[in-house]
Amino acid sequence: MNNAPLSQLLTEIGRINPLQTQFLDRSLSVLSAQERTTFLQYLNYCLAQDITVEHLAKSYDLIVKDTFREQVYFRRHGQYRHQSYQEVANSVYHHPEYMNQYMHGLALSTFLWPNHLAMYRFFIETLPKQRTGRYLEVGPGHGFYFMKAMQCSQYNFYQGVDISATSVEMTQRILSCPHFNCSADYLITEADFFAWDSTQTFDCLVMAEVLEHVEQPGAFLQQLYTLANEGAHVFITTCINTPAIDHIYLYPDMQSLRQQINESGFSIKNELVIPYLGKTLEETVVDKLPINTAMVLEKR
């Protein structure tokens, strides 16, 4: 496969943000051959959609700089900048230009940020490959996880729900593109998951990078519980002390997250806890640095 798009992307990111150069070189060095191929497939897909390397580099740089700014705010104030959905809705979720860049930048971070790569690997590793039934993803965002689920599993129907019209459009576009050969039946719905009225229950439920974006994550977990069939595979990710422009719910520690999950009726079947890059988990906790976590849940 032609590696030129990847080389061009890294060169362009390094041009606009030289501080990222060594970090990205290290990030690429740990990708498996299959992960590098998947990354290139995504880049070629973007280019085929007339999304330029320059746009992708700016999108990645956007989340790098936004995240750094929010980390500075968090260290100074001990809280996220925003605490309500209304504070960020118009500037993020309902701002097509910003949301487009934000989602493309996050898609690239799947391969370029070690913490995001670890969660992606955990998602693929734990996803049931042979089960059938109905798949639900809450907040598919850029659509990459949704697309990989369709590639890797055998569910009969795939449903996505996202509050952002831009995310709905991006997910629909990636699923309909021949680059990824997604042939299963699916439906992507623009809706607030908390108010979404589904007549169906599901056998696999995915809610990645959602809980920290909502005011009542416990209610979202309870809604997920209601929609899960007995024996359903339930995959979630979230974060501790991890500021971002649209993160509004602050989990101060893993204990508070685990308690919320327990109160929703789920138990934790499998768990991945990722400390801050270059730090042990103990050091990360003591210094209140960002922690990422991914979990497989099951109904009690």
Image: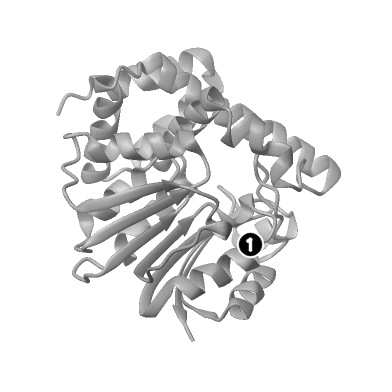
Quarter assignment of residue 123: bottom left
Q: Name the foreground residue: 258 vs 286.
A: 258
Quarter assignment of residue 231: bottom left
Q: Position of residue 10 (x, y in %)?
A: 39, 22
Label 1: which residue? 217
Q: Quadrant of the N terminus?
A: top left
- The residue at 69%/70% (across/down) is 256
Left or right, 278 with respect to 90, comes to left
- The residue at 28%/20% (across/down) is 47
Q: Position of residue 16 (x, y in %)?
A: 52, 14
Which amino acid type is marked by label 1? Pro
Left or right, 147 with respect to 247, comes to left
- The residue at 69%/45% (across/down) is 85
Q: Position of residue 112 (x, y in %)?
A: 42, 37
Secondary structure under tag 1 reads helix
Rendered position, 182 above or below 88: below
Q: Name the foreground residue: 154 vs 89.
A: 89
